[in-house]
Image: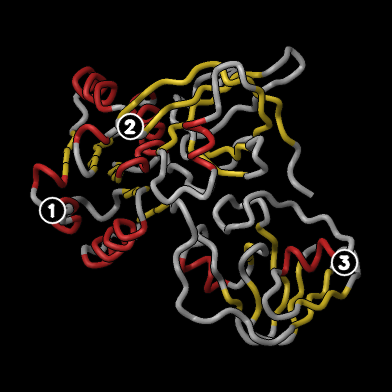
Amino acid sequence: MSSPTLNALVYAMRHEAEGIVSVEFRPASRDVAFPVFEAGSHIDLHLPNGLVRSYSLCNPASDSGRYVVGILHDRKSRGGSRYVHEQLRVGSRISISAPRNNFKLHEDAPRSVLVAGGIGVTPIWCMLQRLVAIGRPVELIYCARKREEAAFVTEIEALARQHDVPVTWHFDESAGGPPDLAALLAGRKADSHFYCCGPGPMLDAFERACEKLNYPAAHIERFAAAPVEAPAATQSFVVECARSGKVVEVPPGKSVLDSLIDAGLNPDHSCKEGVCGACETAVLEFDGELDHRDGILTKIERESGRTMMICVSSCKGKRLVLDV
């Protein structure tokens, strides 16, 4: 089943940049309490048009009783961001999830280097505010196609001036092209932690740059699962459910999650796109190899074979044992 939701009121909407609005949610009634959250967390919006979309929280993690997200009106929207921009209004009431965090901030790091690409600034802005609040060394690299499309610029500039935070701005339009992340990241100490959120090509470039520069503590968050070139499973396999005792066949073209649901089980889930983390399930045994297609797990986590996102990932062998 899906995680329990919270009844939320759209308390405020604000224009933040070209094509970007922030939406502030507050409890819709006195009996609703918003859980506390950590920097890097996101919430799912259960939109009235039936879609569920995940958005990162950008307000300070110290805030109590409100969640703020920043949403880009995506030119390729499949209905989520379009609905928010064109139909969601102040006073609307919708269901949201409690915050989840797949992009954890290591607050004890000797230094943190935050890299934002476009709307990817939302979790990065939350992280920046948190690290400044607790007095930890931090710097920001903010990239966008042009300044007019960059959200929270005024607020970031004010915070940077007040707390002497180094900020590097890169706008493709004025710079004549995309950022050279290897050049921008060079010269940092290897024990620094590096964080990046942005479009897929930028994240790929960030990972390559960190590997080239021998920065082991590199963390990313994707808007969507990375494209996978290999074809989906073409043969069925069996899922043995250790807790329930059920044995479920997963046919070609069908997800593990949907197969379990059809078999009468109720695994936790939300986005069904491999980006929210709600359906993460412990793997106990498997034949062959796991076919990871999510946008969350790190390379090390995938190689460990201990967990998987059952909404998009599968098994290339004939048998998979899950803690379900």
The amino acid marked with disc number 1 is Gly
The mark that comes first in sequence, 1 or 3, is 1
Pick out the residue farthest to the front.
86
Give the amino acid at mark 2.
Arg
Q: Which residue is mark 1?
A: 177
Q: Neighbour class for label 2 at 10 Å: few (<14), some, many (≥20)?
A: some
Using residue 177 as the reference point, say whether residue 194 is left or right of it.
right
Q: Are marks 1 and 2 in contact (CB under 8 Å)?
A: no
Q: Which residue is mark 3?
A: 263
Please state the horizontal and vertical placement of residue 138, each as a whole percent of the image: 28, 36
Q: Please identify, in this view, whether the residue under mark 1 or under mark 2 is nearer the observer.
A: 1
Residue 127 appears at what percent x and percent y? 39, 35
- Protein image colouring: secondary structure
Position of residue 4 in the picture relative to residue 68 (left or right): right
Regarding mark 3 in the picture, which secondary structure is present there? Answer: loop
Q: Left or right of 121: which side holds 66?
A: right
> Which residue is labeled 2 in the image?
136
Q: Residue at x 54, y 42 (%)?
A: 80
In depth, the one of 289 and 273 nearer the eye is 273
The quadrant of the picture occupied by the C terminus is: bottom right
| Neighbour tally class for label 1: few under 14, some 14-19, many 20 plus, Cα within 10 Å | few
Image coordinates of residue 270 in percent, x first then y, are 67, 49
Q: Decide: is 71 above or below 89.
A: below
Q: Amino acid at mark 3?
A: Ala
Q: Residue at 68% of width from left, 18% of height from top? A: 28
Q: In 3D space, how far apart are the residues under numbered discs 1 and 2 (Cα atoms)? A: 32 Å
Instruction: Point out the tag, 2 or 3, that comes first from the N-terminus.
Output: 2
Q: Residues within 10 Å of mark 3 (few under 14, many from 20)?
A: few
- On the image, the x and y values in percent for residue 212 come to 22, 67
Q: CA distance from mark 2 to mark 3?
A: 49 Å
Q: Secondary structure at mark 2?
A: loop
